Image (spheres, grey):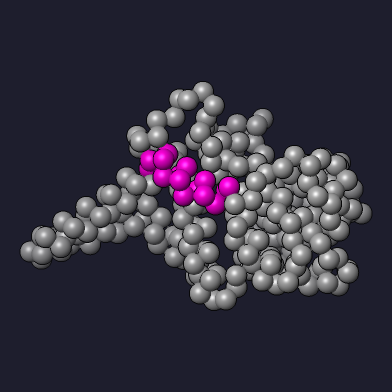
């Protein structure tokens, strides 16, 4: 497991809360009640903090707003479109609402729209096999062909397992084909880390994120300061990005 993923799994709200509560109870058993109480309180406050929609809108929104989503027709042209494997909140259109297959927008949808709008003649799909034998690139290739992108336009990178490997292995593919400028497609939340990793490799990259997901519902039904289970569950994606940016910075990858 990459260190950034390990760190994110360690500090996601449920895991860290339960860890601190268990340690706090154990310390209380050994008569260290004050220290144990502090740990228990810290764990519960950490979980409460990440269960608030206001937290997601603040910290997640800060990442998503770095690179605004543009309609395909308004996006610049490039030599190729690069699509990164992965998923955020199941591709649902709104972070705070139940998953709806009819409104879900995944990364290949954005890439297909860009290709069909004539923004680039090639689509490079990047992603290895995280589980099983089928790479994410192959899965995305099947999905994007269903939307009208021809096989002849596709380039597959089947080995990467992290954003850093997405950048390094894709850069090799681009260089071998003489491709200089690319539109980078990933989730809006993931885009700051992806842009930093690709820029570090010297790729001339333009952000073309999927539509943002961390936006309040238009009907005003979301109570920002009340704990919400869906927000609590999805918060791990925000934490993963901040942990990833920190680890990538430490390693000199961004």
Compared to 200, does 80 lie above or below? Answer: above
Q: Is residue 81 left or right of residue 219?
A: right
* Foreground pick, 83 / 195: 195
Displayed quadrant of residue 84: bottom right
- Residue 6 position in % (x across, y down): 46, 66
Residue stretch in magenta: 51-65
| Residue 252 is at least partly visible in this image | yes
- Residue 227 position in % (x across, y down): 35, 37
- Residue 31 position in % (x across, y down): 7, 64
Q: Characterize the magenta stretch by its predominant secondary structure.
A: helix
Q: Is residue 64 left or right of residue 170?
A: left
Q: Residue at x 15, y 63 (%)?
A: 35
Magenta highlight on residue 94: no
Displayed quadrant of residue 79: bottom right
* Foreground pick, 17 / 176: 176
Q: Residue at x 53, y 41 (%)?
A: 214
* Foreground pick, 5 / 29: 5
Q: Residue furthest bottom?
A: 251
- Marker count (numbered): 0
Q: Is residue 81 left or right of residue 222?
A: right
- Residue 41 position in % (x across, y down): 22, 52
Compared to 144, does 198 lie above or below? Answer: below
Q: Is residue 47 left or right of residue 119?
A: left
For the C terminus, give its image quadrant: bottom right
Magenta highlight on residue 62: yes
| Residue 154 is at least partly visible in this image | no
Q: Residue at x 38, y 40 (%)?
A: 52
Q: Residue at x 64, y 60 (%)?
A: 194
Compared to 219, does 167 lie above or below? Answer: below
Q: Residue furthest left?
A: 31
């Amino acid at each position: 497991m990459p260190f950034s993923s390990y760190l994110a799994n360690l500090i996601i709200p449920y895991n860290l809360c339960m860890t601190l509560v268990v340690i706090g109870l154990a310390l209380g058993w050994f008569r260290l009640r004050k220290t144990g109480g502090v740990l228990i309180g810290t764990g519960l406050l950490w979980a409460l903090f990440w269960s608030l929609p206001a937290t997601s809108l603040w910290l997640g929104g800060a990442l998503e707003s770095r690179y605004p989503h543009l309609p395909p027709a308004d996006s610049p042209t490039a030599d190729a479109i690069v699509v990164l494997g992965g998923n955020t909140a199941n591709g649902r259109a709104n972070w705070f609402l139940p998953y709806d297959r009819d409104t879900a927008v995944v990364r290949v949808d954005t890439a297909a729209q860009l290709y069909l709008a004539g923004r680039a003649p090639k689509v490079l799909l990047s992603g290895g096999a995280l589980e099983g034998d089928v790479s994410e690139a192959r899965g995305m290739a099947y999905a994007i062909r269903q939307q009208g992108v021809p096989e002849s336009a596709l380039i597959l990178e089947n080995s990467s397992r992290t954003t850093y490997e997405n950048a390094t292995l894709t850069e090799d593919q681009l260089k071998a084909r003489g491709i200089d400028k690319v539109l980078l497609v990933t989730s809006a939340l993931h885009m700051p880390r992806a842009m930093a990793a690709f820029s570090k490799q010297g790729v001339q990259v333009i952000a073309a994120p999927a539509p943002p997901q961390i936006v309040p519902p238009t009907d005003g039904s979301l109570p920002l300061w009340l704990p919400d289970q869906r927000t609590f569950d999805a918060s791990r994606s925000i934490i993963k990005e901040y942990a990833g940016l920190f680890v990538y910075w430490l390693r000199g990858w961004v």
